[in-house]
Image (tube, rainbow, N blue to C red):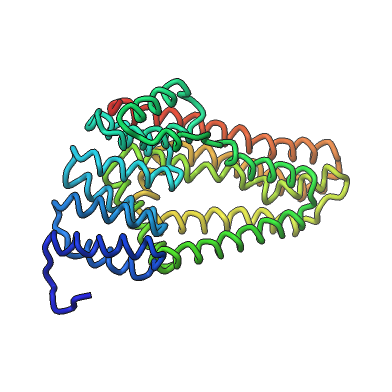
Amino acid sequence: MPEDSPQGSPQDSYAYLVRAKALADERRVAEAREAVDWALAHAGPGDVDVLVLAGVILLMVGDAHAALSVALRAADAEPDSWEAQVLRADACRILDRIPDAVTAARRAVVLAPDEAEAYVALWRALARTRKGRAELAGTARRAVELGADPEQFGSSRWWLHYIPLVVAAVMIRYVHGWALAAALAGGAGLAAALWVVQARSSGSTPSGRLLSMRALARAELDRDPAKARIAALGTTSVLSFLPLTTTGFACAAGGDGAPWSTWAVGAAAGGAVVAVLVGARAVGWWYGTAFLRRDIPASGFAALQLGVVGVLVGCSVALSLLGTTSVGWWTALAAAHFLWVFVGFGLTVVALRRERRRRAAPQM
């Protein structure tokens, strides 16, 4: 990179992006990323064409988070840029943020009703949903009329995303606790390894990519209060699983006629408390202390989830302290642990869908 040129022009940035595109085509990811970073560093705040091209190349090298950040930057600079909205839609789709992808793609179609690329972006986003099949077909038809390649409109295969859930349900039902814990630990290790590989393949580092994602998450919440409410609901939804994965195992053992010792049940209850504290600290680090202290309590679900966690964990400890050996009591409490996973998570899903409809309604 030209170290003696601290200032650059849009033409300089565009030239480096053309070079970055060629490097990306050759799979020289690190060099392509370096060229993109230089171009972005020297691009002006209103160089929307440069920003959009940079975002496209970032998608090519596999860094959708950075691409989304660039798309938001371009959309802020020029709200009527349909190219920025297409980039935003594609990045959100790759990141599995489908409602945001649909919203951005719809905005692109409104801004450019005669651009095939806008309809293609909308079709790709709609194809990741389970509804709107008539609109999906109409969008594809309109894109083809405007010159899009008809062969790109294949099946969405949304059902593939449910395979991990089915596998997890089978494991919980038929696999013993230690084997399940080992499987979960192995899955976490594999996910971490894939994260490192993906970060390096995009020309970044694991820590750099993580910090970039955190900055993007905080910026989005500051920009959109509705998204802060959605993030609060999503964050607290994991509390539905906490009792089952701690004292729930102790209750299941009691229901099988082999209750845990009091110290073991107490350790499980302590694990639940530690998980809440560690989770709160992690959320504060990711979204900021303002989100933890203001947005999460405002959602109302944190109090409900924590209250139920306290009741289930407390009842488990109480039964153990009383020395209860009744299979019926332990079975009933184990059933309550299991039932709350579905009830608590279901309530959160309903609230999330309502909040997302409210957020998307003014932009339709």
Instruction: Identify which residue is drawn at 22% across, 32% down.
Output: 111
- Looking at the rendered image, the quarter that the C terminus falls into is top left
236 relative position to 357: left or right: right
**Residue 337 lies in what quarter of the image?**
top right
Asked where in the image residue 185 lies, by quadrant, the reply is: bottom right
Give the percent coordinates (x, y) of residue 49. Answer: 19, 50
Which residue shows up at 59% across the image and 36% down it?
A: 159
Would residue 33 appear left or right of 170 to someone viewing this image? Answer: left
Task: Point out residue 38 in the picture as x, y percentages from the top left corner.
Answer: 23, 67
Q: Position of residue 262 (x, y in %)?
A: 77, 55
Side of 30 where 351 appears, left or right: right
Q: Nearer the viewer, residue 258 or 101?
A: 101
Residue 338 vertical placement versus 1 (above, below):
above
Q: Name the residue nearer the viewer: 118 or 229.
A: 118
- Point out residue 224 in the picture as x, y percentages from the top left corner: 29, 41
Residue 92, above or below 358: below
The front one of 241 and 8 is 8
Can you say which quadrant of the picture contains the N terminus? bottom left
Residue found 64% across the figure and 45% down from its top = 164
Q: Is residue 354 above or below residue 295?
A: above
Taking the view exactly as shown, the residue that stands out farthest to the right is 257
Q: How many marks?
A: 0
Relative to 204, residue 68 above or below: above
Furthest residue to the bottom?
Answer: 4
Q: Is residue 307 visible?
A: yes
Residue 218 visible in the snapshot: no
Q: Residue at x 82, y 46 (%)?
A: 254
